Amino acid sequence: MNIPLRNLCWILACLVAGISLPVTAVPQVHIASDGTKYLIENEAKYNWLQAHTECVSSDMQFAVLDSVEKNQAFVELLRQIGGKLPNLWIGHHDNFNTAEQLNRRFFSIINGYEIDFNNWDKGEPNNALYSEHCVHIDSSSDFRWNDHHCENKYGYVCEEPQKSTNVSCDMLDISKTVYELNQELSEDHKNHQNEVQVILNDNRLQTQNVLHEWQQSSMQTLDKSQKSINEIFARKPYLSAVIADVGPSIKQIIREAYNEISQFSHEAQHAIDGNSVDTQTSIMNKSEQFHEKLDENTNAVDGLLNQRGK
Ligand SMILES: [Ca+2]
């Protein structure tokens, strides 16, 4: 059972206040005209926290009267039961408010939500001495409500857990699960991004290496060409006279140089394109894995919702 932080703090405050252990109860089950099943303890020997504990021990929950219809059906039930009923604790509290007396906010012990309906008795809730933090039904005042000291010993009212409360708890569970899945998803995506970045860096490094090799090779080819030309000129100082003789050789050497540069340029471009394809393939694979992960998480959420819906 999830205990909202507001309620947890509230319970701890009660414990700090030194409230004693619960005593044995023999409450009776009744069903109101709106179908709500109540457990009513008519022995006035429970403080507010003990009453809450007794309800939980009975697989029930502290009664929360949060609408005019629900309160009306419950009051009708009390009138049908008749007899002399003690004051009855219900699951409303002011979150240990010691700063205000009138116009305070009251909350449900079940889900921590503020209760926007009330059936206060005249002049209530007054938070006398700033120490009336728990709510009871005043049996001597037409079952209207009063805020009072939580240590007082009254009877109490439990109710069968309402569907709306279960849905609220389920939604909390689902929200928590979705949050955890999203965290996992975010972490997974972050890892994929890092992997892609490594691939891109590798690709960039490979490209730089190819270009560097191409530049070096080109320079070596040109040096080789220049050296060959110089050797021809050295061997044949009368070049000007025999230009027709060396001309074809020079043209052939330069042509070979250009061919080599062109060929290596083509290889370099091919290597770069190859790496780009690898990078794109890797990115696509990672993206596919990412979407598979998304589907897994979506199915997990659907499964949880279906399970909760049964
Ligand atoms: Ca009061």
Image (cartoon, helix red, strand yellow):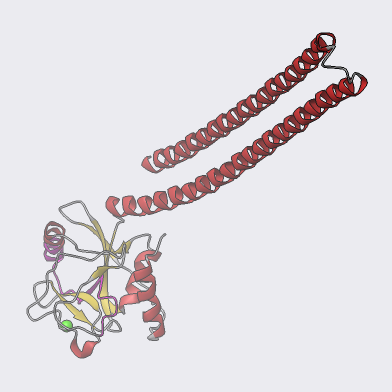
In this rendering, position of residue 192 left or right of residue 108: right
The image position of residue 164, as x and y in percent, is 27, 52
* Quadrant position of residue 271: top right
Say if 203 sits above or below 269 in the image.
Answer: below
Question: Magenta span has 286?
Answer: no
Residue drawn at the location 29% of the way across and 80% of the way down? 96
Say which of 104 and 290 sits in front. Answer: 290
Q: Residue at x 61, y 31 (%)?
A: 279
Give the image location of residue 294, x and y in percent: 48, 37
User: Is the N terminus in the top left, top right, bottom left or bottom right quadrant?
Assistant: bottom left
Is residue 42 in view from this perspective? no
Give coordinates of residue 157: x percent, y percent: 26, 67
Magenta residues, start to end: 75-98
Side (left or right) of 185 relative to 60: right
Residue 161, horizontal then vertical, whole percent? 31, 56
Q: Is residue 81 magenta?
A: yes
